[in-house]
Image (cartoon, rainbow, N blue to C red):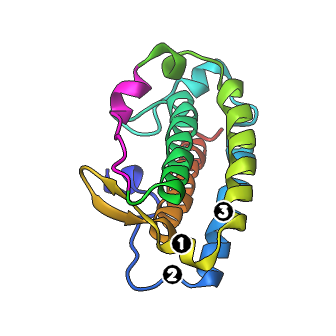
């Protein structure tokens, strides 16, 4: 079950984040919408409504979750870049995934949103100065988060959910 839940492992990072590492993570964030589009290509409605693991979200919910989560992350970046260590508002992602816009909406809505969001996010990330990567926000549950580490978390997050879909397709022979 752990391999189904965390197909690429959990995000781990310690130490400093190099400029090269940041660039790789930015490239992963920019590439994610195309990877998700490819991962779900050709899936029918029944397949989109298949959970990627027992008691897991459906493929449809995963796609909509990525849009919700990454939109929140972009906002957190912008808050941290324009305010001094702002405390961000967390959200209940599991409850969001149960709302109709995640459970039944056409995945194309979130695919288009992801493409535009990640293009804009990439522009922001590539414009950041070295000192800006040290800026932080405060997450009420996780504490102080540096923007360079948050970048890595969200690059991992995209790969993590893409792997959920790709692995399900492989297991199901789709």
Marks 1 and 2, how far apart at CA: 9 Å
The answer to whether mark 1 and mark 2 are in CB contact below 8 A is yes
Q: Residues within 10 Å of mark 1 (few under 14, many from 20)?
A: many
**Residue 88 among those drawn in magenta:** yes
Is 35 located above or below residue 113 in the figure? below
Q: Which residues are magenta?
A: 86-98
Marks 1 and 3, how far apart at CA: 9 Å
The residue labelled by disc 1 is: 133
Tell me the SS state at disc 3: helix
The residue labelled by disc 2 is: 17
The answer to whether mark 1 and mark 3 are in CB contact below 8 A is no
Q: Which mark is residue 144?
A: none
Numbered label tally: 3
| Residue 65 seen from this side | yes
The nearer-to-camera label among 1 and 2 is 1
Q: Name the quadrant containing residue 9.
A: bottom left
The image position of residue 154, as x and y in percent, is: 52, 57
The residue labelled by disc 3 is: 125
Is 27 located above or below residue 64 in the figure? below
Q: Residues within 10 Å of mark 2 (few under 14, many from 20)?
A: some
Residue drawn 35% across and 35% down? 91
Chief secondary structure of the magenta portion: loop
The image position of residue 51, as x and y in percent, is: 46, 32
Ranked by sequence position, the earlier of labels 1 and 3 is 3
Ranked by sequence position, the earlier of labels 2 and 3 is 2
Q: Is 174 on the left or on the right of 79, as rendered?
A: right
Ranked by sequence position, the earlier of labels 1 and 2 is 2
């Amino acid at each position: 079950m752990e391999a189904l839940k965390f197909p690429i492992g959990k995000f781990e990072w310690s130490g400093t984040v190099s400029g090269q590492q940041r660039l790789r993570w930015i490239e992963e964030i920019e590439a994610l919408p195309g990877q998700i589009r490819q991962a779900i290509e050709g899936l029918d409605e029944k397949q989109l409504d298949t959970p990627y693991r027992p008691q897991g979200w459906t493929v449809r919910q995963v796609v909509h979750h990525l849009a919700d989560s990454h939109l929140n992350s972009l906002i957190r970046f912008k808050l941290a870049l324009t305010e001094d260590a702002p405390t961000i508002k967390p959200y209940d992602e599991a409850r969001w995934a149960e709302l109709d816009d995640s459970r039944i909406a056409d995945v194309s809505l979130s695919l288009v949103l992801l493409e535009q969001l990640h293009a804009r996010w990439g522009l922001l990330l590539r414009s950041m100065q070295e000192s800006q990567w040290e800026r932080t926000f405060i997450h009420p549950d996780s504490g102080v988060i540096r923007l360079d580490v948050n970048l890595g978390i969200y690059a991992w997050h995209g790969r993590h959910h893409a792997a959920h879909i790709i692995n399900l397709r492989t297991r199901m022979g789709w």
